[in-house]
């Protein structure tokens, strides 16, 4: 009888482990695959590309992409303090982009560009710490 209980408990533990790895927990890879799309949408609108003087700056598009990225960043799970701290940096710069692009005031393009640079460095910081060998861009 005792042996059987151990067996049932063992199956439960294995089942919980499988459930935990396949659903629920969002991996860095899942989060980042989405982050790069939002990042590129913002980047395409940095107002510095040749010919951009003919395209009006897409404040709404940048704001929407930054908002989506911010929400996505919030889903990241942390196993240690550094991971959490770097993710917070990313979130902070995204917030600045949401604010600047949302206000769409004089100088907003430059403010967004400024925060984009820090965003790039913050994304990069995490990759440098956790996945140096992948040479990710950012
Ligand atoms: C808290 C840490 C962390 C932050 C912040 C972070 N990343 Fe990542 N990122 C990772 C890790 C870890 C991987 C490697 C995942 C794996 O094992 O394949 C990764 C992978 C990627 C990949 C490759 C995904 C693929 O196709 O396999 C891209 C692209 C990426 N990150 C973009 C970004 C961008 C853009 C940002 C900023 C908005 C960002 N990341 C912020 C940790 C982070």
Image: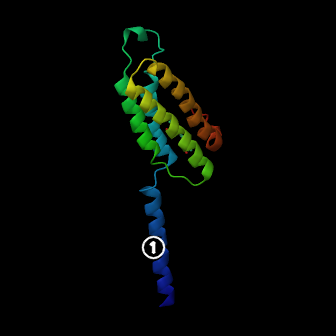
The answer to which quarter of the image holds residue 54 is top left
Residue 46 visible, this angle? no
The answer to which quarter of the image holds residue 128 is top right
Relative to 53, is 136 above or below? Answer: below
Residue 7 visible, this angle? yes
The residue located at (50%, 82%) in the rendering is 6
Residue 48 or residue 32, whichever sits in front? 48
Locate the C terminus by quadrant: top right
Residue 61 or residue 110, whichever sits in front? 110
| Disc 1 target residue | 12
Image x and y of residue 68, in percent: 39, 37
Image x and y of residue 103, in percent: 39, 26
Image x and y of residue 40, in percent: 45, 28
The residue located at (59%, 46%) in the rendering is 85
**Label 1 packing within 10 angstroms: few (<14), some (14-19), many (20+):** few
Q: Secondary structure at mark 1?
A: helix
Residue 93 or residue 48, whichever sits in front? 93
Residue 32 or residue 74, whichever sits in front? 74
């Amino acid at each position: 009888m005792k042996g059987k209980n151990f067996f049932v408990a063992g199956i439960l533990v294995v089942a919980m482990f499988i459930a935990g790895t396949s659903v629920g927990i969002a991996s860095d890879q899942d989060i980042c695959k989405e982050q790069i799309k939002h990042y590129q949408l913002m980047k395409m609108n940095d107002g510095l590309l040749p010919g951009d003087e003919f395209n009006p700056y897409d404040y709404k598009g940048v704001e929407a992409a930054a908002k989506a990225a911010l929400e996505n960043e919030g889903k990241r799970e942390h196993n240690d303090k550094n991971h959490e701290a770097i993710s917070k940096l990313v979130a902070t710069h995204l917030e600045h982009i949401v604010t600047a692009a949302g206000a769409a005031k004089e100088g907003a393009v430059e403010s967004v560009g400024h925060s984009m640079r820090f965003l790039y460095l913050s994304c990069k910081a995490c990759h440098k710490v956790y996945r140096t060998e992948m040479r990710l861009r950012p």
